[in-house]
Image: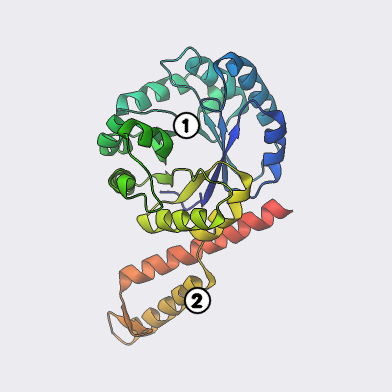
């Protein structure tokens, strides 16, 4: 799994030029340029053209550029691939993945285009069949990441979502397990009430604690809250630094463990501490580059 942070992953309608322009100045770690749900059937072709034009203009800086294409069983999927190859996005996101064969099919099609040689594939996990096949999908050699589509999944499961997302936890956890076993990125679903900062903060913390790398967002106002939730806090950074120092001192004295704040520190805790420090440094570097 890459150490590159994906704290905030913002959906932007692929055919809305004003939104594409604004996205250049939003401090999100990644952008999903959406050609699927955010675009009406009658606007698919024009949205695709608008998106390619804007991606070629550039200006999105350090943000990971992800294009969600239409499914390959729609009239637009293959044409989406051919068009966006000119713009060399970082990731192509395939919606409604049910089986690993869909990822392999996309990989074969992408291999036909020079502009997509380095483009990675992510999968939307938003169907009951996809959730049941999460380990198989995650293990697909072509796959680099997963994104939870919790709205579509809730609809198909006929469940109601409360503030704890208790009815969704089994699906969320299964996908996290599959992604972690495969060593790929895993991003949580959206929080729909974009004016409810408290609710967003609680759900972002829940997603972080479940093991997600970040969260997808539907509005720029959600970015700062989610960035903070998925970034190491100053307290966590301080603890990580002290754990590293204490364990080094213990090792020099021939001991296999150290004690920090009354808790045992073993090698596994030191590995996690180094990961925390590395993540904080990468985030700081990204923020400096974004603000230049």
Which residue is found at the position 31% from the left and 46% from the top? 167
| Residue 39 pos. (x, y %) | 57, 23
Would you say residue 142 is visible in this rendering?
no
Which residue is found at the position 66% from the left and 46% from the top? 26
Q: Is residue 6 above or below residue 255?
A: above
Q: Is residue 257 above or below residue 138?
A: below
Which residue is found at the position 41% from the left and 77% from the top? 243
Would you say residue 49 is visible in this rendering?
yes
Residue closer to the observer: 201 or 246: 201
Answer with left or right where residue 224 lies relative to residue 232.
right
Answer with left or right where residue 219 lies relative to residue 137.
right
| Residue 20 pos. (x, y %) | 68, 34
Q: Which residue is mark 1?
A: 93
Q: Residue furthest top?
A: 75
Quadrant in the rendering for residue 186 = top left
Which type of secondary structure does the marked residue at label 1 adopt?
A: strand
Which type of secondary structure does the marked residue at label 2 adopt?
A: helix
Q: Residue furthest bottom?
A: 253
Q: Which labelled disc corresponds to residue 104?
A: none
Q: Which labelled disc corresponds to residue 238?
A: 2
Q: Is residue 6 above or below residue 262?
A: above
Q: CA distance from mark 2 to mark 1?
A: 36 Å
Answer with left or right where residue 30 lies relative to residue 145.
right
């Amino acid at each position: 799994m890459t150490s590159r942070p994906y704290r905030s992953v913002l959906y932007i309608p692929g055919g809305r030029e004003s939104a594409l322009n604004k996205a250049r100045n939003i401090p999100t770690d990644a952008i999903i340029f959406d050609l699927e749900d955010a675009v009406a059937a009658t606007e698919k072709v024009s949205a695709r053209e608008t998106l390619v034009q804007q991606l070629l203009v550039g200006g999105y800086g350090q943000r990971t550029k992800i294009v969600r294409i239409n499914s390959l069983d729609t009239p637009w999927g293959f044409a989406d691939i051919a068009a966006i190859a000119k713009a060399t996005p970082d990731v192509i996101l395939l919606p409604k993945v049910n089986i690993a064969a869909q990822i392999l099919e996309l990989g074969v099609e992408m291999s036909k285009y020079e502009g997509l040689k380095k483009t990675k594939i992510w999968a939307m996990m938003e169907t009951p069949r996809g959730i049941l096949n999460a380990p198989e999908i995650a293990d697909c050699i072509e796959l680099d990441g997963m994104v939870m589509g919790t709205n579509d999944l809730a609809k198909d499961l006929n469940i109601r979502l409360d503030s704890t997302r208790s009815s969704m936890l089994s699906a969320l956890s299964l996908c996290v397990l599959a992604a972690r076993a495969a060593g790929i990125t895993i991003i949580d679903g959206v929080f729909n009430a974009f004016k409810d900062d408290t609710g967003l903060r609680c759900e972002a913390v829940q997603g972080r604690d479940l093991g997600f790398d970040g969260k997808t967002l539907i509005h720029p106002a959600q970015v700062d809250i989610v960035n903070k939730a998925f970034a190491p806090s100053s307290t966590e950074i301080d603890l990580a630094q002290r754990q590293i120092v204490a364990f080094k001192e213990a090792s020099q004295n021939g001991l296999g463990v150290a004690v920090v704040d009354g808790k045992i520190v073993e090698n596994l805790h030191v590995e996690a501490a180094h990961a925390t420090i590395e993540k904080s440094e990468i985030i700081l570097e990204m923020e400096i580059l974004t603000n230049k």
